[in-house]
Image (cartoon, helix red, strand yellow):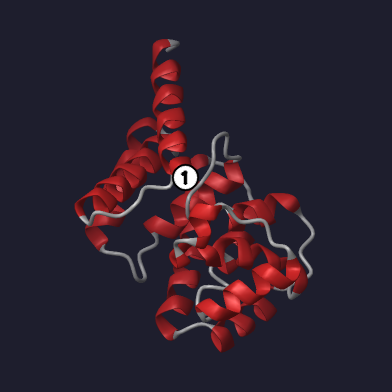
């Protein structure tokens, strides 16, 4: 896959800050893979292009969803902040010619996540929040500490969900049911894994 082509497209279609964030997520995914001792080029590619539709105007997001039958939930349609994820998977497929479902799913679910996320999905989800180019250093450090403490991504992802849920509650915003489902699932998974140690 042509990383230079992806970067050129992103530079032309994202704001400078969003482009820097994308590069940061790409770098963070490589760091996460190195920390975990895994090679995951798919996660690195998905991390780089995960926000490829982030700067599209809302009417363009809705047009693409409608004209291309992009699968979105009712809750996603009511929250424009998450629509770039399903549309981003569509852009990755149609503009970047990516057919690999592991990459497409990682882009599709990088905002809300889902139950039983693959390793690739978890890396992209976390890289999006942990990158150091545009994210607050204290948040990145907190997530890296959680990742380091147990050597798996789930603890850091749980922290992400806690922060998201708290922010939504503090601002009287609706919580996507899938957010709660994924959080609950991860909590149970982590508790179960610690009982078997």
Of residue 165 and residue 5, the one placed in the foreground of this image is 165
On the image, the x and y values in percent for residue 162 come to 30, 42
Q: Is residue 152 visible?
A: no
Of residue 197 and residue 170, the one placed in the foreground of this image is 170
Please identify the residue farthest to the bottom as the structure is shown: 12
Q: Is residue 143 visible?
A: yes
- In screen coordinates, is 16 left or right of 122? left
Relative to 186, residue 117 above or below = below
On the image, the x and y values in percent for residue 15 come to 45, 84
On the image, the x and y values in percent for residue 161 come to 36, 44
Residue at the location (35% across, 64% down)?
A: 132
On the image, the x and y values in percent for residue 83 come to 53, 64
Pointer 1: what residue? 35
Quadrant placement of the N terminus? bottom right
Please identify the residue farthest to the left as the structure is shown: 170
Q: Secondary structure at mark 1?
A: helix
Residue at the location (64% across, 76% down)?
A: 63
Residue at the location (25% across, 61% down)?
A: 137
- In screen coordinates, is 132 left or right of 91? left
Q: Residues within 10 Å of mark 1 (few under 14, many from 20)?
A: few
Relative to 24, residue 10 above or below = below
Residue at the location (48% across, 78% down)?
A: 19
Quadrant placement of the C terminus? top left
């Amino acid at each position: 896959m042509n990383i230079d082509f992806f970067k050129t497209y992103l530079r032309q279609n994202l704001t400078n800050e969003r482009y820097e964030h994308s590069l940061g997520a790409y770098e963070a995914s490589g760091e996460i893979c190195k920390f975990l001792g895994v090679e995951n080029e798919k996660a690195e590619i998905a991390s780089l292009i995960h926000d490829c539709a982030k700067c599209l105007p809302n009417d363009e997001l809705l047009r693409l969803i409608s004209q291309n039958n992009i699968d979105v939930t009712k809750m996603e349609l009511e929250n424009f902040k998450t629509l770039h994820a399903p549309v981003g998977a569509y852009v990755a497929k149609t503009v970047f010619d990516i057919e690999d479902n592991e990459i497409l799913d990682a882009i599709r679910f990088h905002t809300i996540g889902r139950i039983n996320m693959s390793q690739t999905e978890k890396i992209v989800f976390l890289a999006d929040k942990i990158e150091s180019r545009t994210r607050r250093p204290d948040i990145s450090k907190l997530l890296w500490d959680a990742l380091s403490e147990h050597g798996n991504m789930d603890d850091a992802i749980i922290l992400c969900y806690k922060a998201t849920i708290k922010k939504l509650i503090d601002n009287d915003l609706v919580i996507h049911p899938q957010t709660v489902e994924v959080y609950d699932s991860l909590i149970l998974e982590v508790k179960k894994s610690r009982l078997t140690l």
